[in-house]
Image (spheres, helix red, strand yellow):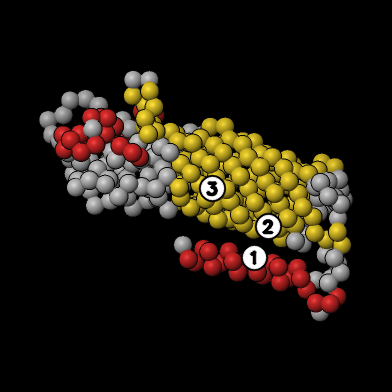
């Protein structure tokens, strides 16, 4: 985590440094809106991208330091979900877990254009780009039972916060590292469209409320109530053995989520040309 923060800070300082020593570079503020989809990768969907996509939307403020480097601030909202019943894996089908969660994200980072780009330039109006950010996001995994949704974190479905587990309840406010690519092209002066994809590395394995081992449902019911026991083990079929102590999820792999879609941006202000001769 420190490595990522250190490198992002270094990148920002490097961009400001290169911008400050160049003469006559043009700065521009852009803002815009985003619409597309969101999905997640985790214990209930380990490797199939775009499988559980739901609508997402957001906004962006971009500050262009040079024709190649920009700072960006984004706010995004989407919904992610997963369900074992859609899996091709017999074990997952038998496990029969499911969840959904809203994702509210605020992010700040660096965007780097591969070509020289200016939103006012209609002669060279296109550039691929990539970005990396630091994000705060809020999640709240829920499960459905008899047509009603229940917050799973407060139930402690793996015994979190009790003598059945050495883990405390996971936090609903988390950090992530968004990494992404895109291509932007001007549709007229001061207006542009971007097609963008960004995936987020998280530092939690509980975006889907699934990570560790099954705990004793009778003891969990005594600690956290019958709903906790119900959501803890939803296995299908009759079994002659207990799931207690067996893996419910894979704690070695953290969860991921992604936003993708189309972004419309415009430049509300006229260009300011900064002469930095005094910085030679």
Q: Camera-side residue: 70 or 39?
A: 70
Dot 3: what SS? strand
Disc 1 marks which residue? 12
- Is residue 105 toward the left or the right of residue 140 in the image? right
CA–CA distance between discs 3 and 1? 21 Å
Asked whether the residues under the numbered discs 3 and 1 touch, taking CB atoms below 8 Å apart as contact, a structural biologist would say no
Quadrant where the C terminus sits is bottom right
Asked whether the residues under the numbered discs 1 and 2 touch, taking CB atoms below 8 Å apart as contact, a structural biologist would say yes
Q: Can residue 221 be seen in this view?
A: yes
Q: Is residue 91 visible?
A: no
- Label 3 neighbour load within 10 Å: few <14, some 14-19, many 20+: many
Residue placed at 39% from the left, 48% from the top? 171
N-terminal of the pair, mark 1 or mark 2, is: 1
N-terminal of the pair, mark 2 or mark 3, is: 2
Nearer the observer: mark 3 or 1; the answer is 1
Residue 229: image location, x then y, percent: 23, 33
Q: Which image quadrant is residue 98 in?
A: top left
Whether residue 129 is situated above or below residue 149 in the rendered picture: below
Disc 3 marks which residue? 199
Residue 97: image location, x then y, percent: 33, 32
N-terminal of the pair, mark 3 or mark 1, is: 1
Asked whether the residues under the numbered discs 2 and 3 touch, taking CB atoms below 8 Å apart as contact, a structural biologist would say no
Q: Camera-side residue: 92 or 88?
A: 92
CA–CA distance between discs 1 and 2? 8 Å
Dot 2: what SS? strand
Dot 1: what SS? helix
- Is residue 152 toward the left or the right of residue 276 in the image? left
Q: Camera-side residue: 20 or 67?
A: 20
Q: Which disc number belongs to residue 71?
A: 2
CA–CA distance between discs 2 and 3? 18 Å
Whether residue 208 is situated above or below residue 17 in the rendered picture: above
Residue placed at 57% from the left, 32% from the top? 55
């Amino acid at each position: 985590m420190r490595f990522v923060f250190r490198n992002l800070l270094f990148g920002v300082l490097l961009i400001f440094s290169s911008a400050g020593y160049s003469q006559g570079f043009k700065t521009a503020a852009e803002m815009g809106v985003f619409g597309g989809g969101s999905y997640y990768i985790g214990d209930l969907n380990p490797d199939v991208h775009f499988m559980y996509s739901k609508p997402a939307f957001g906004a962006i403020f971009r500050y262009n330091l040079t024709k190649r480097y920009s700072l960006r601030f984004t706010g995004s909202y989407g919904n992610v979900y997963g369900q074992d019943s859609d899996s091709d894996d017999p074990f997952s089908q038998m496990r029969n877990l499911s969840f959904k969660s809203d994702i509210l994200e605020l992010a700040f980072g660096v965007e780097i254009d591969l070509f020289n780009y200016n939103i006012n330039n209609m002669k060279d109006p296109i550039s691929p780009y990539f970005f990396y950010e630091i994000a705060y996001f809020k999640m709240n995994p829920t499960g459905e039972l008899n047509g009603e949704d229940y917050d799973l974190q407060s139930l402690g479905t793996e015994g979190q916060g009790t003598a059945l587990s050495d883990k405390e309840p996971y936090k609903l406010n988390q950090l992530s590292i968004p990494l992404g690519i895109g291509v932007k092209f001007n549709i007229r002066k001061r207006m542009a469209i971007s097609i963008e994809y960004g995936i987020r590395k998280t530092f939690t394995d509980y975006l889907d409320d699934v990570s560790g081992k099954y705990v004793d449902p009778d003891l969990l019911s005594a600690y956290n109530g019958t709903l906790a026991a119900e959501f803890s083990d939803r296995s299908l079929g009759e079994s002659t053995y207990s799931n207690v102590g067996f893996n419910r999820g894979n704690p070695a792999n953290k969860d991921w989520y992604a936003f993708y879609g189309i972004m419309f941006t415009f430049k509300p202000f006229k260009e300011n040309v900064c002469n930095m001769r005094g910085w030679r």
